[in-house]
Image (spheres, rainbow, N blue to C red):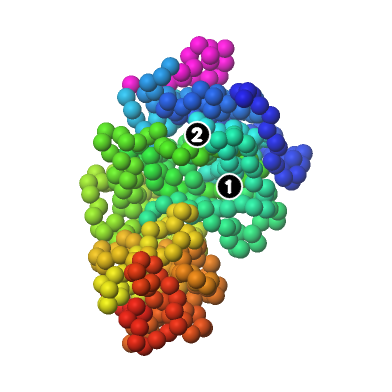
Amino acid sequence: MSFKRKLPDPRDEWCKVPGRYLKNLPQTSVIICFHNEAWSTLLRTIHSVMDRSPGHLVKEIILVDDYSDMPHLDEYMEKYHKVKIIRTVKREGLIRARLIGAGHAAGPVLTFLDSHCECAQGWLEPLLDRIGRDRSSVVCPVIDVLDDTTFEYRFQNASMMFVGGFNWNVQFIWYPIPEREIKRRNNSAEPIRTPTMAGGLFSIDKAFFERLGTYDSGFGIWGAENLELSFKTWMCGGTLEIVPCSHVGHIFRKHSPHFPYKGMTAQDIMKRNSVRLAEVWMDEYNYYVYERMGFDLGDFGDVTSRKELRRNLHCKSFKWYLDNIYPELFSPGDAVVSGGIGNDWSGLCIDSPCCKPSSFNKPVGLYPCHRLGGNQLWMISKQGEIRRDEACLDYAGGKIILYLCHGTKGNQYFEFDYKNKRIKIGLMNKCVAMSRDKKILIAKKCSADDETQNWDLV
């Protein structure tokens, strides 16, 4: 497949109206970091930037080679005067590699791309337009899917957008555009305010990035940096948007090239980064993050300078962020009760991994009660949901499964009768029980004599 192939134009007609964007847009430095990236995908990324961007808007393309152990690009790129290659002398990880690229950038706007992308027609102007109108705007393109096997480009139209959120495990999630945001906009192709960004592809004014303290230099390799930048953008005077007129395809790889690293797993690094994030930016709500870690925070380093940065910027509270930017997020503090749900006959607790897409639509399991939270921490909401963050117990007949919370009761409505140790399912005469092999949750006709239906908070 050619390094310079044709792609469909995924833009809504609204985006193509003459005069839609400012005449004098700011220039950008495009920063692409990589480690042992395949030549084909890397070159396709670079050529898509060069071929589908107005030349006068791209100040330079900075390639940061994060200590690859295979030869890359020097001879090939000699003929492209806007391309600069920077090579690290040791493995730095994605976060620090980006900071190295930003330190070499001459453009007033920084645009970060992953090394396995393809930019669609007209991708750049809508991003720079938002920053040209407001230098505190941080903007992301729509991230379309490049199939990792066939390289087919699958784009989303403006009526099928999602926005970014997170859960209390400090994991980024996508969720539907809130009704309040739909009403705020006059056209589905207009920029969408988003609580968080995915983090791989975005543009930001360089001076604003520096004012926000760039990335936390105490973060390792990769993970949670997207949430940190999202939180402080909103809390410290900026706005964060997804721009439906800008489309960039992205290959979602099955395996990360960043791990293992110096004996550390992705989980090790993500935990350290998450704790640093929670300590600095999440105020008293960091309790919910630590609860999911079993309060084992490990060594997360010194965050004094990051807290001082926040004070100097006079940033708003995390409660303000939740109330105004992400009111859709269920707060554990709003639960009627929370804890483990155990069966005294078997000594087992309701236990289920959460909350990746692979966790959904699967029978909810059981495991010996350990009282350490984690997969056994459940919250009962005022709406009668038994939930963990964005995942709820759901019964539509057959087995009880874990499903994305929808907030409309129905299959996710339960009544916990603490006195009689029964969890009644909705308005039907069925109760939550365990299978006789003690492996999964099922629904059975409510019976006072059935020990498999005995449930207590533990």
Q: Position of residue 444 (x, y in %)?
A: 44, 79
Q: Which mark is in front, 1 or 2?
A: 2
Q: Amino acid at mark 1?
A: Ile
Q: Is residue 21 above or below residue 418?
A: above
Left or right position of 324 against 58: left
- In the image, 195 versus 419, the foreground residue is 419
Report crowding for label 2: few under 14, some 14 to 19, many 20 or more residues within 10 A (C-alpha): some
Q: Quadrant of the C terminus?
A: bottom left
Q: Is residue 277 above or below residue 287?
A: above
Q: CA distance from mark 1 to mark 2?
A: 17 Å
Give the magenta-colored segment's residue range.
72-89
Q: Residue at x 50, y 30 (%)?
A: 115
**Residue at numbered disc 1:** 242
Disc 2 is placed on an element classified as loop
Kindly tell me whether residue 377 is visible in this rendering: no
Total numbered labels placed on residues in the image: 2
**Residue at numbered disc 2:** 114
